[in-house]
Image (cartoon, grey):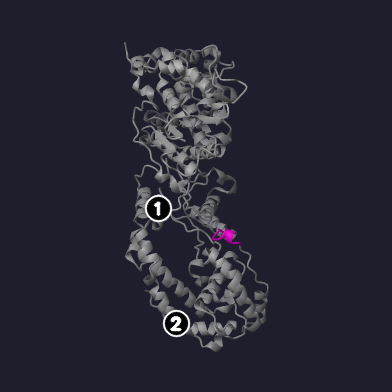
Amino acid sequence: MQIALNFLFLFSFYLFPPKILCDSTCYDAKQEGLEHHLATKTPYRVIANVNDKKIEFDQCSPIRMWGIFRHGTRNPSKKQIRRMKTILSEHRDAILAKGALCERDKEQFRTWKVHLNEDEEKFLVPEGEVELIELAERTQNRFPDLLFDQYDNLTYKFKYTHTQRAKKSAEGFATGLFGRDNIRQVWYPEPESRDPILRFYKRCPRWKVEVDKNPDAMEQVRLFISSEIFRAFLEGLRVKTGILDLSAEDARLMYTTCAFETAWDRHRISPWCSLFTRKSIKIMEFLEDLEYYWIDGYGYELTYKQACPAAQNMFEHLNPNAKTSQYYVILYPFRKKQIRRMKTTLSEHRDAILAKGALCERDKEQFRTWKVHLNEDEEKFLVPEGELELIELAERTQNRFPDLLFDQYDNLTYKFKYTHTQRAKKSAEGFATGLFGRDNIRQVWYPEPESRDPILRFYKRCPRWKVEVDKNPDAMEQVRLFISSEIFRAFLEGFRMKTGILDLTADDARLMYTTCAFETAWDRHRISPWCCLFTRESIKIMEFLEDLEYYWIDGYGYELTYKQACPAAQNMFEHLNPNAKHPNITLYFTHSGTLLKYLAFLNLYRDQQPLLHTTFGGNYSWRSSLIDTFASNILFVTFSCPSGAKVLTMHQERVVTVPGCPLDSPLCDYAQFEEIFQQRINECNFEQMCTIS
């Protein structure tokens, strides 16, 4: 198959005697403030700063923000859920039979059940989502000039780890910022299970050996459990529960359950908390503090030194001169010249439109908040939506051909190649992610890209085409004729009236159309404000203008344009041949110029008459909005059939019939398919064809 395609403590206790611990007087855990001593399971609501007054400093303005948020309240682990269902249920029965509890507390134990499923281990619970929503709202109130309530992916960068709880926490925070109705437009990069910034410790085998799995790291925990303080506490808990063989692990399970169930519901305290007093719960809290200090804190220097990548990332984003706040900030669309015009010409036009334009108030409001967030040094970069398009395209393609596109990579089956550009590279990586998953794309091998690849950018090696077509003023004659036509002049006059810019030029209109197109492509949930300047009819005029240009520069306008694609066709047949020794899957990632010329070489979307300025309003096949979108793709698949090898051709994921193949079948005999192009391939003398005479 061949395819082409354009983020040690010191502590002292005053220990109550056992007779206090086994007092049957009902204990008010809420009044005693047990919620404040649940260690890492403490609900955020008990420590949150609810003062959300705007934070201001004289003569200073906030310009950048970088934050790390732990996920909200979650379910226990699978192991903990299993122990709650078995061990804790048995302990509940023993407590009801022999425990020294008041009747009210016993009643709570009678109705206690485990409602957790192991397949929802560590999932975010509703309270966790509420925590993040409220946190976002307070943060936004403190920094209203920085945290706007309208999302755009050039202002905000969200990223989460490869877990449900982190994803749902991110979505909760986004809900607090933008509202429930608007969170679908928020883009998140594909999470990594071992993210180098968010889970750097997962990538540090030395830390895992020397700290995380090192028995010595838990020495202080073991010493505290064997101390007089803990042994006295445990004896008192045995008397209170009536479970005389209660272990330290059992006590920790009860404490953990107390913590989780209390964190889940801000209106209810877990019955397991009634087993603890304010003093005894501090013992369990200290036990957790010891463990987290030695495993995740200051116990070992390596533990915190390994966090340096996160610190580097923080400074990259906090730097006042940082060039982007984005993950990758579909394509940074414009060339530097166009970006410069957006920052100057288009910004001036925006101001004029607000002052004199004939727009409704809603459309004007969109223009008021419009800003240029593009940097010239990132021209034509792939943006998040572009990566997502390739990931989704790969997943759909794999679903169509599961017996061919395996989800395990090996370089004897797959061949990837991309051009010497960031957008082609990131597109290839996005497609690989869709096939193999984010965790496996590092093993994918790519050859060193060439700036003038003979297959992927053949036209860059053809000086004759550059002179006779690409830089030939005559090639744009039909475009000029259309711009001077009555149709276009009438459109432009109406456009001037709508914008209030009486000296608006055709180039200005094209810049507005291009900005409308790119900004809409970046965000699948939002239309660019520049699009509101166009009606359905007027946008077709701009679309036709583009169709004319691409037809004459990259399509059927000049024979040389598509004939020079013969090296790509030769390469295709070398890989599609049923007896080929090449990898079965060949995946090329290139550009619009290559794909359009190749479509013309295949004789697809060709009308009987050439596309002229007078064609506007008629039916024609060369529609760039359909055949040359972002992530455009053409796919050829060789099938082994009882009657011989056959070829399937797909463009934009739809079956197309190459002229010369049967119209009544999606498959074309391989021999017939080869015969259609045989002469042109045999006569493919690229050097001679492209030499300037």
Give residue 537's position: percent from left, percent from top: 59, 22
In what element is the residue under mark 2?
A: loop
As rendered, which of 328 and 248 lies closer to the eye? 248
Residue that numbered label 1 is attached to: 197
The label on residue 298 is none
Q: Is residue 224 above or below residue 364?
A: below
Figure quadrant of the C terminus: top left
Badge 1 density bin: few <14, some 14–19, many ≥20, Cα 10 Å: some
Residue 325 appears in view? no
In what element is the residue under mark 1?
A: loop
Magenta stretch, main secondary structure class: loop
As rendered, which of 368 and 516 lies closer to the eye? 516
* Amino acid tagged 2: Phe
Distance from the alpha carbon under mark 2 to that under mark 1: 39 Å
The label on residue 13 is 2
Give residue 272's position: percent from left, percent from top: 59, 74
Q: Residue furthest front?
A: 642
User: Which callout, 2 or 1, points at the residue further toward the start of the chain?
Assistant: 2
* Amino acid tagged 1: Ile
Q: Residue at x 68, y 77 (%)?
A: 107
Give residue 503's position: percent from left, percent from top: 46, 21
Examine the structure image and report whether residue 120 is included in the region drawn in magenta: yes
Q: Which residues are magenta?
A: 117-125
Examine the structure image and report whether residue 447 is included in the region drawn in magenta: no
Q: Is residue 215 above or below residue 201?
A: below
As rendered, which of 333 and 578 lies closer to the eye? 578
As rendered, which of 244 and 31 lies closer to the eye? 244
Q: Residue at x 41, y 42 (%)?
A: 444
Q: Would residue 138 appear left or right of 214 to someone viewing this image? A: right
Give residue 214's position: percent from left, percent from top: 38, 68
Verify CB contact (< 8 Å) between mark 2 and mark 1: no
